[in-house]
Amino acid sequence: MFRAVLIDDEHLALIHLENLLKKLVPITIVGVFMDAESAIEQITDLRPDIIFLDIQMPEMNGLEAAERLVSLCPSAEIVFVTAYDNHALEAFELNALDYVLKPLNMDRLSKTVNRIQKRLSYSAANEEPAEVTISMFGSLKISRGSEELPIKWRTQKSQVLFALLFHHVNEFVSNHTLIEQVWPDTDLEKARSYLYTTVYHIRRCLKQVNVDLPIEKTSGAEGYCMRLEGNINLTKKWEQSIRSLDEITPDNEQDASEIIEAYKDDYLKEFDYLWTLSERERLRNLFIHHALKLAAYYTEKENWMEALALYQRLSYIHPYYEEAYLRQMEIYDFLGDYASVEARYQTIQYMLQQDLDTVPSAEIRSWYERWKARV
């Protein structure tokens, strides 16, 4: 039996919705309100599974009311009830949110309720205690145990907004900043509508895979804060681990190798936004510094193949990092693999010319010329 709350400032509309819902089993109506504030005051006691919310009310916009209701009752599903409205409907369709149009239709209402019941039943049946982890190396990845969760982001903007909030995890981020970063060229009224509905969509996506990662809207504040509780930020954990590395020794060699290997790719590589650039550069430099230390350790121990693999990995992460190519050429030369020396030099020379309209550094050119003269 699912519990429902109805909110609409039109008395007749409430009666009509209530009559229709009473014909749908198994729904129990636990609260009927003509203003959002009253519903917000009682929502935690009512503990509804579904909230039917009119989008157009005089004192509080339905989208804003939804934010407050979901923050107080995060397990509830919301169905927006609305007359035809361009901004609202566009936002709903964009984020695949549940809505029904006035005048209400029994068939559409029944399909909406059934769809939500399936989601609620699935969530209840698939609760798992395994630890949730979140990584932002390369792409955004949310996993439970060893399995990546199949989160179905409706749009790239949903994923970007989640990543932006997680980027500032446990910090307050203003609506202005979120809109400026995610919808910079969108009309302000429409962008605010997109923000509200996208936050709701993110919450629903997380709930569907049983991830407890609250997105709070501080009372009286125009913005959001994503709270990190039981979930583990793998990117932050990686940084703490790599900064704890001292000089590499036989005792910590394996740990150092595993930490370097955990850097799968640059921070949110697929997101080209200003807010990712400085963090991407900072973490990449941290990786390069410690990868060079480990590669030098391998070289000193004459572990040539491990050193070579690490320098190749540096070339992949930072294609224009010339030192990685020079070290590879030196190792190939030592191993007598002259064809690979030539191939590495031609690769960096061609890439720099094509991409940056420049030539390899004087150090690399000088080394290569001496090598050519010798072989």
Image: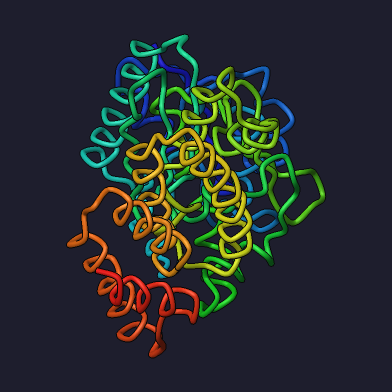
- Note whether residue 14 is visible: no
Q: In which quarter of the image is residue 302?
A: top left
Compared across the picture, whether 304 is left or right of 164 comes to left
Quarter of the figure with the C terminus: bottom left
Give the residue at x 52% y 32%: 259
Q: Which of 374 and 289 is in front in this view?
A: 374
Give the residue at x 58% y 34%: 238
Quarter of the figure with the N terminus: top left
Give the residue at x 34% y 43%: 309
Compared across the picture, whether 106 is left or right of 73 comes to left
Q: Which residue lies most toward the bottom here?
A: 357
Q: Where is residue 345 in the image (x, y as percent from the top left)?
A: 30, 71
Compared across the picture, whether 245 is left or right of 235 comes to right
Q: How is the image coloured?
A: rainbow
Q: Where is residue 91 in the image (x, y as percent from the top left)?
A: 42, 60
Q: Where is residue 170 in the image (x, y as percent from the top left)?
A: 72, 39
Q: Which residue lies most toward the right here?
A: 220
Q: Which residue lies most toward the left here?
A: 339
Q: Nearer the viewer, residue 248 or 218?
A: 248
In the rendered view, would you say 57 is above or below 217? below
Q: Position of residue 239 (x, y in %)?
A: 63, 38
Compared across the picture, whether 347 is left or right of 258 comes to left
- Note whether residue 238 is visible: yes
Q: Which of 274 and 220 is in front in this view?
A: 274
Query: In this figure, what is the number of numbered marks?
Result: 0
Q: In which quarter of the image is residue 108?
A: top left
